[in-house]
Amino acid sequence: MNGNISGGAYTLGFDSPVTFSGESTLTASTVTFSKAVDALGQLTINGDTAVNGGSVNSGTFKQIYNGDVTANGAGNTTFTGSAIEFGNKLDGSHGIYVVDDG
């Protein structure tokens, strides 16, 4: 999956592992990931983001979060990428790791 995905004023929810195959922009009031996320291109999220399981890995690509990011999985959450931008608050109930090569 890739491209522009919009939920408008609603929530976009991903209950299974998800792979974005190219540059992707998600826009919604809240984007929720329940499993691992892999991005094979820049990943931009406009709205709040909830990572409730797994981690977000964009390899050598950028991640941009234009909203609050909350990591509430059962264990630690890792964001891996290049030049990762958190526009607002980053918070969580367990360990949060940011592995950024940019």
Image: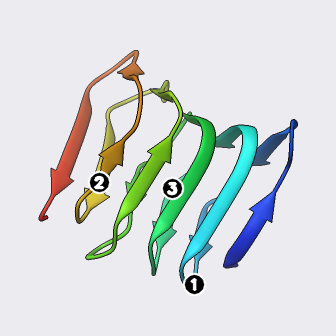
Outermost residue on the top side: it is: 93
Q: Which residue is mark 1?
A: 21
Where is residue 42? Give x, y as percent.
44, 72
Please give the label number shown on residue 36. Answer: 3
**Labels 2 and 1: the sequence-earlier one:** 1
Q: What residue is shown at x 45% (from left), y 81% (from top)? A: 40
Q: Amino acid at mark 1?
A: Ser
Where is residue 16? Give x, y as percent.
69, 56
Q: CA distance from mark 2 to mark 1?
A: 18 Å
Q: Amino acid at mark 2?
A: Ile
Q: Helix or strand or loop: what does disc 1 sit on?
A: loop
- Looking at the image, can residue 16 be seen? no
Quarter that holds the C terminus? bottom left
Quarter that holds the N terminus? bottom right
Q: Which residue is mark 2?
A: 84
**Labels 2 and 3: the sequence-earlier one:** 3
